[in-house]
Image: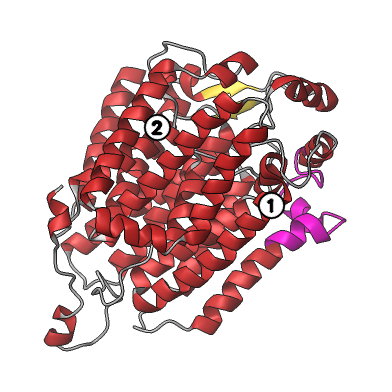
C-alpha cells in the first residue's frame, strides 16, 4: 500500500475509533484540552522536531540549551493551565493542602537548584516540572472520571495508531538503526523505543480500564462499540511494545492489567485484603527478579540478559560519579557537563542521559533526601488512593494501576523525571482524590433498584463552564 493511501486509511481508522468510543452523556470541562495537548507532546516529540525546525536533542549542547519554540509552547500551556486553576481556586487549594508530601518534594527540587552546577537550566526544568503538576490538577475535573477517560482516549487513539503508521509506512520517521549493532530501533511517533514503550504502556492501561468499564455496562450497541474501539487500541499498543522490544513496558502493562482485572469484579465492594496482596505480589516479583535472583533466571525467561541490556554497567558507572550522596547534584543536573562525557567514555555509550532506574535517578539528582521524599510519596499516595478505591471503585482502580506501573517501571527505567508520561500519571494517582461526600461517577453494574442507580450519578457543577 503506498504511504499516502495508508495515511488516508489510518486517518479514517482513527476517526472511526473516536466515533465508536463517543459518549454523549459525558460531562467534562473544555479545559482538559490543555493537559491533553501537554501529554500529546511529551508522549511523542517536541514541537521543534515535529516541525523539523531544530535538533532532536541528541547532542549535549542541544540538551542543555533546549529550544525557544518548545519553551514558548510549554510556557503557553503552563500559563493557560494556571489561568484555569485560578478559576478553580477553592478546589486547587483543597487539592494542594491535602497533598503535603507532593509540595515538599517539589519544594526540595527547587531548593536543590542552589547547589546545581547549572542553576539556570535547573530552574527552567523545574518550571516544566511544575507544569506536570498543573496538568495533573486540571485532570481532577468536577467529573474526574469523564475527564481522565477523555484525555487517555485522545492520546491513545491518536499516538498509538500513528506510531504503527510511522513504523510500517514511514521508516525514515518511525525507525532507526542502532549505531553499534545496526539492529532496527522502532520509535513510532516518539524519539526512542523507551518513550514509545512508555506511551503504549499508559495508553494500554487507560484503554483496558475503559474496556472493562464498558464490559460491566448493560448489553447494547454502544457497549459493543466502546469495547471494539478500546480492544483495537490495546492490541496495537501490545504489538508496538513487542515490536520495540520494550520488555519493561510490557511487564508493567501485564502487571498493571492484572491489578485492573483483580479490582474489576462486578461486586459493589472491594476486597481490600486482596488488593494489598496483589500489589505486594506484583512489586515483590519485579523486585525479586531484578535484585534478588542473582542467577537471572526470571529475567532470562523474558528473553533478557542478566545485565538488563547493560543497565548494571550504567549503574556502576554513575555511582562512581556521585559526589554528594545526601543532597545529589541538583534537580535534573546530574547528566550535564564533563560528568556526562566521563560516563559516556566509561560505558562506551555516547548519547545516554538516564540511569535506567528511576530511584537511582532521583538519588543522583536529589540524594538520599530526594529518595526519602519519593518513598514518602509512595507510602502516602498508596494510602490515599486506597481511600479513593473504597469510595469510588471505578476511579480507584485506574489510580491503583498507574501507581503500580509507576513503582515497577522505575526499577529498570528512569520514569520519575519531569515530563515523562509515567511520572505524570503516577503523580495523578497519588494526588487525585474525590471530594468527601461527592457522589460516585460510575460504579460496577449490579442488580439495584432504579432509585439506587440514580443516586450514583454525579451532579454537574459550575466548574464545567470553563
For the point 79% across and 57% down, the residue is 291
Q: Secondary structure at mark 1?
A: helix
Which residue lies most toward the top here? 53
Left or right, 292 with respect to 373, comes to: right
* Residue at the spot 32% in from the left edge and 66% down from the top edge: 213
Residue 416, percent from left and from top: 58, 46
Residue at x 82% of width, y 61% of height: 292
For the residue labelled by badge 2, is the local secondary structure a helix, a strand or a loop?
helix
Residue 369 coordinates in the image, percent (x, y): 69, 52
Position above or below: 297 against 385: above
Q: In the rendered view, does 132 fall on the left or right side of 65?
A: left
Report the residue marked by disc 2.
41
- Quadrant in the rendering for residue 121: top right
Q: Assess whether residue 368 is covered by the magenta stretch.
A: no
Where is residue 126 drawn, in percent x and y? Answer: 51, 36
On the question of residue 253 being in view, the answer is no
Q: Which residues are magenta?
A: 286-310
State how far apart marks 2 and 1 are (Cα): 31 Å
Residue labelled with disc 1: 369
Horizontally, is 252 left or right of 212 in the view?
A: right
| Residue at x 67% of width, y 39% of height | 365
Depicted 11 relative to depicted 142: above or below: above
In the rendered image, which quarter is residue 176 located in? top right
Q: Is residue 381 visible?
A: yes
Vertical order, 99 against 415 (above or below): below
Amino acid at each position: 500500500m503506498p504511504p499516502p493511501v495508508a495515511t488516508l486509511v489510518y486517518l479514517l481508522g482513527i476517526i472511526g475509533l473516536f466515533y465508536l468510543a463517543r459518549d454523549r452523556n459525558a460531562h467534562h470541562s473544555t479545559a482538559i484540552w490543555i493537559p491533553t495537548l501537554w501529554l500529546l507532546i511529551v508522549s511523542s516529540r517536541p514541537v521543534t522536531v515535529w516541525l523539523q525546525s531544530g535538533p532532536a536533542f541528541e547532542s549535549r549542547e542541544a540538551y542543555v540549551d533546549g529550544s525557544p519554540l518548545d519553551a514558548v509552547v510549554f510556557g503557553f500551556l503552563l500559563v493557560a493551565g494556571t489561568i484555569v486553576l485560578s478559576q478553580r481556586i477553592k478546589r486547587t487549594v483543597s487539592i494542594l493542602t491535602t497533598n503535603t508530601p507532593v509540595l515538599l518534594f517539589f519544594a526540595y527540587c527547587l531548593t536543590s537548584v542552589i547547589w546545581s552546577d547549572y542553576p539556570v537550566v535547573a530552574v527552567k526544568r523545574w518550571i516544566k516540572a511544575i507544569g506536570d503538576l498543573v496538568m495533573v490538577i486540571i485532570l481532577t475535573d468536577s467529573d474526574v472520571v469523564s475527564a481522565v477517560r477523555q484525555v487517555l482516549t485522545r492520546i491513545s487513539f491518536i499516538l498509538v495508531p500513528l506510531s504503527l503508521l510511522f513504523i510500517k509506512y514511514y521508516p525514515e520517521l518511525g525507525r532507526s538503526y542502532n549505531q553499534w549493532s545496526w539492529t532496527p530501533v522502532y520509535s513510532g511517533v516518539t524519539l526512542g523505543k523507551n518513550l514509545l514503550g512508555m506511551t503504549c504502556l499508559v495508553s494500554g492501561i487507560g484503554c483496558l480500564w475503559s474496556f472493562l468499564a464498558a464490559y460491566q455496562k448493560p448489553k447494547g450497541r454502544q457497549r459493543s462499540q466502546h469495547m471494539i474501539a478500546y480492544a483495537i487500541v490495546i492490541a496495537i499498543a501490545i504489538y508496538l511494545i513487542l515490536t520495540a522490544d520494550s520488555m519493561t513496558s510490557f511487564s508493567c502493562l501485564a502487571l498493571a492489567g492484572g491489578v485492573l482485572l483483580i479490582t474489576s469484579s462486578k461486586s459493589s465492594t472491594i476486597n481490600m485484603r486482596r488488593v494489598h496482596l496483589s500489589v505486594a505480589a506484583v512489586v515483590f516479583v519485579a523486585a525479586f527478579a531484578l535484585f534478588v535472583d542473582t542467577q537471572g533466571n526470571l529475567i532470562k525467561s523474558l528473553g533478557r540478559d542478566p545485565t538488563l541490556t547493560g543497565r548494571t554497567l550504567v549503574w556502576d558507572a554513575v555511582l562512581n560519579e556521585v559526589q554528594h550522596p545526601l543532597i545529589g547534584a541538583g534537580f535534573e543536573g546530574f547528566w550535564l557537563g564533563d560528568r556526562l562525557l566521563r560516563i559516556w567514555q566509561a560505558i562506551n555509550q555516547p548519547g545516554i542521559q538516564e540511569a535506567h532506574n528511576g530511584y537511582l535517578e532521583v538519588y543522583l539528582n536529589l540524594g538520599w533526601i530526594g529518595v526519602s521524599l519519593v518513598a514518602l510519596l509512595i507510602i502516602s499516595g498508596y494510602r490515599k488512593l486506597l481511600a479513593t478505591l473504597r469510595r469510588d471503585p471505578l476511579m480507584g482502580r485506574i489510580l491503583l494501576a498507574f501507581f503500580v506501573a509507576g513503582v515497577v517501571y522505575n526499577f529498570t527505567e528512569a520514569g520519575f523525571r519531569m515530563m515523562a508520561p509515567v511520572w505524570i500519571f503516577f503523580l495523578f494517582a497519588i494526588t487525585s482524590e474525590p471530594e468527601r461526600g461527592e457522589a460516585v461517577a460510575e460504579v460496577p453494574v449490579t442488580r439495584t433498584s432504579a432509585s439506587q442507580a440514580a443516586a450514583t450519578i454525579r451532579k454537574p457543577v459550575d466548574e464545567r463552564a470553563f
